[in-house]
Image: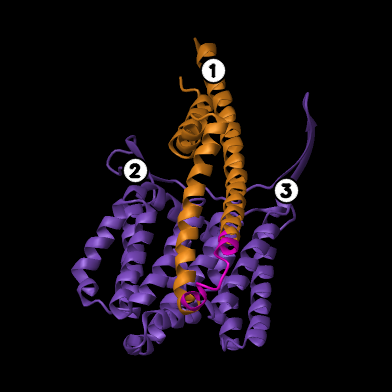
Amino acid sequence: MTDLLLIKEKIKQFLGKYEIYLKPLGKFLLAFISISMINSALGYMERITALPVVLVVALMCSFMPNNFTLFAAGLFTVLHIYFLSLECALVVGVVFVLMGLLYLRFSPKSSLVLLILPICFVLKIPYVVPICVGLLYAPVSAFAVACGSVVYCVISYVSKKATELGMLESEELTSRFRYVVDGLIGNRVMILYMVAFSITVILVYVIRRLSINYAWTIAIGAGAVVQMITLLIGDMILDTGISIVGIFLGNILAAAIAIVVQFFFFHLDYNRAEQVQFEDNEYYYYVKAIPKITVSKTSKSVKKINSQSEKKVRQVNGTDS
Amino acid sequence: MLNEKRIILMTRLQAYEDGPGKGNEKIADYFRSDYIGHHILISVINMTVSFLMLAGCYLLYHFEDVMKDMYQVDLVAIGKRVAMGYLISVVVYSVLTYIVYAVRYVKAKRSLKTYYGKLKKCGAMYAEEE
């Protein structure tokens, strides 16, 4: 355990020391991965799938605010879909604009969730995001998780129905539009994910804010269980065809990853909890203080004794590198 | 001689100034009514644009039915229903905006009050040393 805590301190120091370089690098990687995944899932407009284009856009995203990455990812998605079907691009564009106008202005910091959730879906670990969002953000971020589910399901729908959407050219504009809207709104998997993930975020947030011992751990466990149950019940009712084994294994993995997140963000020693009471002119205070578990780095001191002259003793104090 | 307590306090003050302090100072520059009113105005515009987009999508979706029944339907009644729907959505969204930004304003002010208190304490430490 002490070794893990030492590793955690070293990582924190490394991140703190090189934050000025790591932050743009992280934004570059996030933008590059998001746009590459969009290109591989859709990829109908060949001009923007070229590596130099992706690299240039990702480089721009590394220096701009986070919302620019979201804007770039949305633009790439709409451009690809436009090449496939105008009506589909119109509907997807309207969905993205509505998300931006009605939700993201309240919580621009949650824009990262809209990028990370689809990536986690592709990596087959989507269930980790609602639990981690509940641990780290406010409950209003449930909207961000729901929007992230919509983004992924929209891209997934277009990718699966590409052939059918392409064959609709012979139909009238309004028929094509209706087909696309019915397909997107009637997507039961999307509705199930939105509901299950939102419930998980709110539940995890409520439990981790309780002033009980091991609140975060209980929140993670409860979140994973409730998420599993909601998805299973939803799958039975809506007949969505989500893999049951995937739900179980995914949630177990999500809980494991969330424990790691807890270790980095909220590691407390409940054995040394203190409860104090005091008063001032205005209030009477009941305070519970729980110390964080940290370890200080050991400092090495090297003594070199010159054998030729025993009186000369040099002390060198060095730090770990 | 270095005053450790003062240095720790100053470090925390600087960290606040570099982090949440920036946003909170921008918020506190406004009067409460101006800050909330500004965001409600943006919300009204956003909701109007969103409503128009959704209305356009609805019309396109039901285009054939609309064209078929256009001369038989009571357009005034439909207009009233649409206007009512628009007003309700604007009011609900504005109320939500009011709540969110009122809470943000109060939190920012409270946070800045604590910051100024600590700044005063730091000034008092300097005065003591002199």
Placement of the N terminus of chain A among the 4 image quadrants: bottom right
Instruction: Using the rendered image, report if marks 2 and 3 lie on a common chain.
Output: yes
Magenta-colored span = B66-79
- Asked if A278 appears above or below A207 in the picture, the reply is above
Question: Is any part of residue B40 visible from this angle?
Answer: yes
Identify residue for label 3. A273
Disc 2 sits on a residue from what chain?
A
Q: x, y percentage for residue A129?
A: 53, 67
Image colour for chain B is: orange
Amino acid type assigned to the residue bearing label 3 in the image: Ala
Earlier-in-chain disc, 2 versus 3:
3
Mark 1 nearby-residue class (10 Å; few <14, some 14–19, many ≥20)? some
Q: Which marked residue is nearer to the observer: mark 2 or mark 3?
A: 3
Q: Which marked residue is nearer to the observer: mark 3 or mark 1?
A: 1
Identify residue for label 1. B125
Find numbered disc 3 in the image and state the secondary structure of the residue it sits on.
Answer: loop
